[in-house]
Amino acid sequence: MSHCTTCTTNHPTIADYFSENLYTWCTNCGNFGIHSAVKRALVAEAIRPEHAVLCFDIGCNGNGSDKIGGYRFHGLHGRVLSFAAGASCANTNLPVIAFAGDGGTFGEGISHFIHTIRGNYNVTFIFHNNMNYGLTQGQASPTTKMRMHMNTSPDGPTSDTLNAMRLALTMDVSFAARSFSGDVKHMTKTIQAGLQHKGFSFIEIFQACPSYNKETPHEWYQQRVYDVNEKVADYDTSNKLWAHELAEDLEEKIAVGVLYQNKNAIPFMDRQENRQGFTTDLVSEVISYESVAQQLFDRKR
Ligand code: SF4
Ligand code: MG
């Protein structure tokens, strides 16, 4: 499926997403693979840089905001989902992609995560889970494993580890998938599936952080991940309880792929009965108030 509704011949290439700014990530950081997969997925879905909104949180992931071409917005820590949701309401024709890490999402921004799921805003969320606050040099986050040695907690955190996928499923997320930063091909197809979903797509990417998370490098994930869509016989992505069950294990056998999808969930703007029949989007109505007034007037006649 193509999201590129405004052109049929000007298909994007990876070069269209080029930025001349140099990467600042550490050597072997998982962010490199994630950025590559995001660009590949956008190109495969025929989404040109000028036809998408890329929203970035604070964190190492956010430092990629000027390393990719296109319309980008870099906001406050933990708040990316709120402004991404706003963008998705303002212009329902544009794919909106949000990027954030585990600290921002489940430390500062956990309420935004919950409410964006509740609203089923049309946002594809790339959740970088490297299990620490990498940008500030390796503090424990809510997804850090209990007792994992961190810079500011040498004996490791003593709170239970937050399983992001299980929380998302509990909140009735309409699309839930996982991948890991060592497999660009898998991330690309997973992100494509998220972009094609109508509503909120939660994509958890287990990300290697070789500088501050020594316990789960790419090799660790490589030995444990399995794609439920390929390896689990008759796996049914509409079965939420099954997804819950497979998402629980974060140690031995780690389920990736599309874990759950509710294709009937109604996206936020389609729930607004007072907007039914409108031919304009909010963004154009700001520019042309007369158009809204005319539509309301026509409706009353
Ligand atoms: Fe990547 Fe970790 Fe370095 Fe941040 S601190 S750039 S996540 S390796
Ligand atoms: Mg992090």
Image: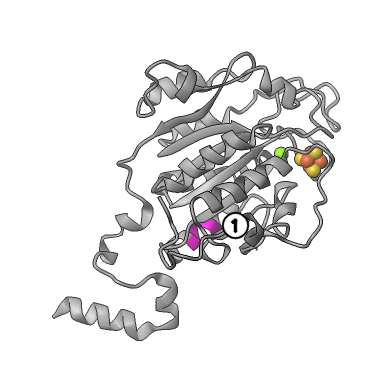
Position in image of residue 8 (x %, y %): 43, 64
Can residue 156 be found in the magenta stretch?
no
User: Please, which residue is most extreme toward the bottom here?
Assistant: 290
- 105 or 72: nearer the viewer: 72
Q: Is residue 124 above or below residue 254?
A: below
The residue carrying mark 1 is 13
Q: What percent of the width, then of the height, locates residue 120?
A: 41, 47
Q: Is residue 174 above or below residue 234?
A: below
- Ligand 2's quadrant: top right
| Magenta stretch, residue numbers | 83-87
The quadrant of the picture occupied by the C terminus is bottom left
Query: Could you classify mark 1 by the number of other residues whose Cα lies within 10 Å: few (under 14), some (14-19), or many (20 or more)?
Result: some
| Magenta stretch: dominant secondary structure | helix
Tell me the colour scheme of the image. Answer: one colour
Q: Which residue is nearer to you in this view: 138 or 128?
A: 128
Quarter of the figure with residue 91: bottom left
